[in-house]
């Protein structure tokens, strides 16, 4: 339980700092870049929850996105499967680009 408190505080801080009243829905390209980077962070730091949370908060801040904006984007895409497939291709391209930069 003690570990959850810092994570909760970090999440609330991120929500506050991101200005969640402004949902800031990302474009397809912004979402692809954000999602690809978040997946790499999650994979790399899955066993270090404090670091993972801190990096994800930083990613939201750096990208200018909010959790609500990302959720709104995902819901819009779920209603349009063809566009969602295009976005998934963009995510894969972004992951390839990020992977090539890491080598």
Image (cartoon, rainbow, N blue to C red):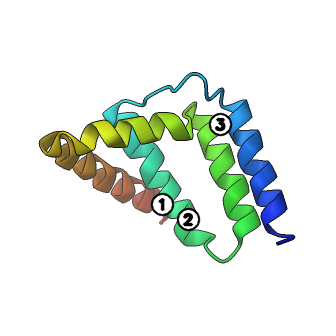
Q: Secondary structure at mark 3?
A: helix
Relative placement, left or right, of 55 versus 88 is right
Q: Which mark is residue 42?
A: 2
Give the vertical position of 85 relative to 79 (above or below): below
Tell me which label, 3 or 2, sits earlier in the chain: 2
User: Quick one: which residue is furthest to the right in this view?
Assistant: 2
Q: Foreground residue, 75 or 48?
A: 75
Residue to which mark 3 is pinned:
61
Q: Residue at x 52, y 27 (%)?
A: 23
Badge 1 density bin: few <14, some 14–19, many ≥20, Cα 10 Å: few
Relative placement, left or right, of 5 versus 62 is right
Q: CA distance from mark 1 to mark 2?
A: 5 Å
Badge 3 density bin: few <14, some 14–19, many ≥20, Cα 10 Å: some
Number of numbered discs: 3
Q: Residue at x 51, y 37 (%)?
A: 68
Q: Residue at x 57, y 61 (%)?
A: 41
């Amino acid at each position: 339980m003690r570990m959850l408190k810092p994570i909760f505080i970090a999440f609330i801080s991120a929500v506050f700092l991101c200005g969640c009243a402004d949902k800031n829905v990302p474009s397809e390209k912004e979402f692809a870049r954000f999602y690809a980077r978040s997946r790499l962070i999650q994979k790399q730091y899955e066993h270090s929850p404090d670091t993972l949370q801190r990096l994800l908060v930083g990613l939201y801040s750096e990208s200018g996105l909010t959790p609500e904006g990302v959720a709104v984007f995902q819901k819009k895409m779920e209603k349009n499967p063809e566009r969602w497939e295009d976005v998934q291709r963009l995510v894969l391209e972004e992951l390839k680009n990020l992977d090539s930069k890491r080598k």
